[in-house]
Image (cartoon, helix red, strand yellow):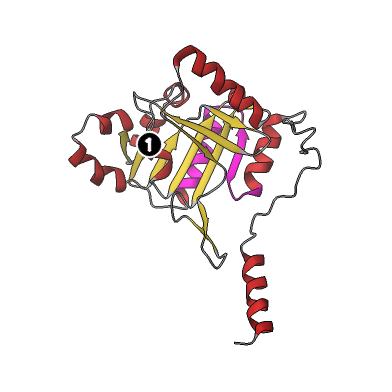
């Protein structure tokens, strides 16, 4: 292979690996790095989230949440769902709604009570994972998901090929600096969680040839539903 041909292929692979490229914010400088979430943090969060390949909407109430989930389920074959125990999900009645559609629901705290040797099969068999969030970051379009005892395992957002997070506007912080501040407050009050995962769009990985692949190390499709009426 000639040098020019080799360099052309490298250039082509590099360009292909820049899918969902997000323009740099000129305000994010060393001297002035706080960007914030703008006048409408929900809109900023969803805009940034979509730019990196996520799907999502702001919805007014519970009925609209179920309408959104119905559209998601119409495009996928979902037989088993992993579900967090979370106040937002409990208030919406997500488990009951899924069961009425004939979908098996596995709450993560039930998985936690199983023997370690029994957890693998039901966990890896799930088609869909539904979680709440601890926070979302408007600036970067990221979900901050903390692993906690009592039904909030990180596997629910990482193992199924399809993931949906349901959150409220009060859980959206303007900037990544605000997230660190919240984690600092939590550390002072009750200690940091064992794991904090920042989810920014679907799982993506680039190999040594800079070929971007989606859905290898986590969900290939992710949804964020912001419910304003809770």
**Foreground of the two, 153 or 228:** 153
**Foreground of the two, 139 or 27:** 27
Q: How many marks?
A: 1
Name which residue lies at 55% across and 38% down. 224
Q: What residue is disc 1 on?
A: 98
Is the residue 198 above or below the residue 188 in the image? below
Magenta segment: does it hold 23?
Answer: no
Indicate left or right for 67 with 106 as reference. Answer: right
* Dot 1 alpha-carbon crowd within 10 angstroms: few under 14, some 14 to 19, many 20 or more: some
At mark 1, the secondary structure is helix
In the displayed image of the protein, which residue is found farthest to the top? 189
Which quadrant would the C terminus be assigned to in this image?
top right
Q: Looking at the picture, how far across and down is residue 206, in whole percent?
A: 53, 60
Residue range of the region highlighted in magenta in the rendering: 51-73
Indicate left or right for 152 with 121 as reference. Answer: right
Q: Looking at the picture, how far across and down is residue 219, in whole percent?
A: 45, 49
Name which residue lies at 55% across and 16% down. 185
Residue 230, visible in the rendered structure = no
């Amino acid at each position: 292979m000639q040098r020019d041909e080799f360099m052309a292929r490298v250039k082509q692979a590099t360009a292909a690996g820049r899918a969902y490229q997000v323009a740099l914010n000129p305000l994010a400088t060393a001297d002035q790095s706080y960007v914030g979430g703008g006048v409408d943090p929900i809109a900023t969060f969803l805009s940034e989230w979509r730019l990196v390949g996520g799907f999502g909407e702001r919805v007014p109430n519970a009925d609209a949440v179920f309408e959104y989930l119905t559209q998601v389920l119409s495009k996928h074959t979902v037989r088993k769902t992993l579900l967090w125990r979370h106040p937002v999900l409990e208030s919406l009645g997500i488990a009951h709604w899924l069961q009425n559609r004939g979908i098996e629901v596995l709450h993560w705290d039930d998985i936690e009570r199983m023997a370690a040797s029994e957890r693998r099969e039901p966990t890896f068999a799930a088609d869909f994972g539904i979680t709440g969030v601890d926070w979302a970051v408007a600036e970067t379009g990221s979900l901050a998901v903390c692993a906690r005892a009592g039904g909030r395992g990180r596997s629910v957002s990482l193992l199924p090929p399809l993931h949906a997070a349901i959150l409220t506007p009060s859980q959206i912080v303007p900037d990544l600096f605000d997230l660190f501040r919240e984690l600092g407050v939590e550390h002072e009050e009750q200690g940091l969680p064992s794991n904090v995962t920042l989810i920014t769009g679907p799982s993506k990985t680039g190999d040594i040839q800079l070929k971007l692949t989606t859905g290898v190390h986590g969900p290939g499709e992710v949804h964020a539903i912001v419910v304003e009426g809770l």
